[in-house]
Image: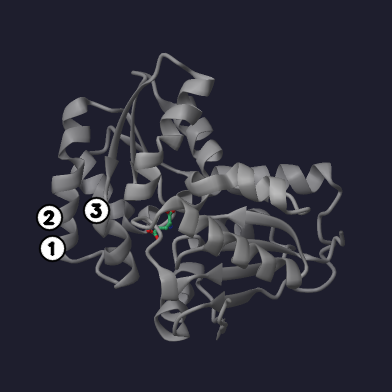
């Protein structure tokens, strides 16, 4: 594997850009190749076997783009089968669930932790398993928030509907008195203002983006694969749907001009 190769990230849409943005901040010399599967978004309601098929196709695509590490920057895709991808590809592959769990366990004092995610992620119970592996004494309160991804992808995060929907989804978690809330979907940090307004300032919102970037840094250090900072890093973005809406959101989030290319996967 080459040091000059890129870090590959994938998500169903713009959510994984929250992880991409942390990578760019933490590892500015690294190049990113990002794939947003916007034509097949959302992943949350789909059967895990179907999500795994999509993810395998995307990792195959990223492999052909010469990446040195793949970040499955999507909780639904991580929950659907991270160990399967890790076993099937020669590249190092990491997900976003374990990093978020580590951050939440560092922050909770009451050991009452909330988890929100897509229907697929919550039904998989991947968060409960990951939390209890590290601390069996933590009480976990989980809640699927299926409409959040659509709210984000349609640019509606500041709408009154977003607030109303958030109120409804989050009420049980507020009543449960959690002191840390894992944003168990990479789209949700883009709704953090609304979620914070509903949950109140005492609840720490945990995004796995930063922790995942730290894990990527550790892996590159271990494999001696840091890209030398000789030339500016040029990132590349691919989507399966129409590039327009993706580019608009990506430019806002990453504060830079980008181009995205549409590709059709088998
Ligand atoms: N951002 C994704 C996640 O973390 C995907 C959501 C979806 O497509 O339903 O779960």
Q: Helix or strand or loop: what does disc 1 sit on? A: helix
Which residue lies at the image location 82% right of the left edge and 41% below the top edge? 222
Eye-nearest disc, 3 or 2: 2
Residue at image x 45%, y 31%?
Answer: 104
Image quarter hosting the C terminus: bottom right
Q: Quadrant of ligand 1?
A: bottom left
Badge 3: few (under 14), some or many (20 or more) residues near its Cα, within 10 Å?
A: many
For label 3, the residue is: 194
Q: Which residue is mark 1?
A: 160
Q: CA distance from mark 3 to mark 2?
A: 10 Å
- Is residue 206 among what the camera can see? yes
Please say if the residues under marks 3 and 2 sit with CB atoms less than 8 Å apart: no
- Where is residue 18 shown, x and y percent of the image? 49, 58
Residue position marked by numbered label 2 in the rendering:
164
The quadrant in which residue 242 appears is bottom left
Locate residue 56, reporting x and y percent.
61, 60
Q: Is residue 11 above or below residue 216?
A: below
Verify CB contact (< 8 Å) between mark 2 and mark 1.
yes
- Image x and y of residue 129, in percent: 47, 28
Height in image: 176 above or below 136? below
Q: Between 232 and 149, which is closer to the camera in this rendering?
A: 149
Q: Earlier in the sequence, mark 1 or mark 3?
A: 1
């Amino acid at each position: 594997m080459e040091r000059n190769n890129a870090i590959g990230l994938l998500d169903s849409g713009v959510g994984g850009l929250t992880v991409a943005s942390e990578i760019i901040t933490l590892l500015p010399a690294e190049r990113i190749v990002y794939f947003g599967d916007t034509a097949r978004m959302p992943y949350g309601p789909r059967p895990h076997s179907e999500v795994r098929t999509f993810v395998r196709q995307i990792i195959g695509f990223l492999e052909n783009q010469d990446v040195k590490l793949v970040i499955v920057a999507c909780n639904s895709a991580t929950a659907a089968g991270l160990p399967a991808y890790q076993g099937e590809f020669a590249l190092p592959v990491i997900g976003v669930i374990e990093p978020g769990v580590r951050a939440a366990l560092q922050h909770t004092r009451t050991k009452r932790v909330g988890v929100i995610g897509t229907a697929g992620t919550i039904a998989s119970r991947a968060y409960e398993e990951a939390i209890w592996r590290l601390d069996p004494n933590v009480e976990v309160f989980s809640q699927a928030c299926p409409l959040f991804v659509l709210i984000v992808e349609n640019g509606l995060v500041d709408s009154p509907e977003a607030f109303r929907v958030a109120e409804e989804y989050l009420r049980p978690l507020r009543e449960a008195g959690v002191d840390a809330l894992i944003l168990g979907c990479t789209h949700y940090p883009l709704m953090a203002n609304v979620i914070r307004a509903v949950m109140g300032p005492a609840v720490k919102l945990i995004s796995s983006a930063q922790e995942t970037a730290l894990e990527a840094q550790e892996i590159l250090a271990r494999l001696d694969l840091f890209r030398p900072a000789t030339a500016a890093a040029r990132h590349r973005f691919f989507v399966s749907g129409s590039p327009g809406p993706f580019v608009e959101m990506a430019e806002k989030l990453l504060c830079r001009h980008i181009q995205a290319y549409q590709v059709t996967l088998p």
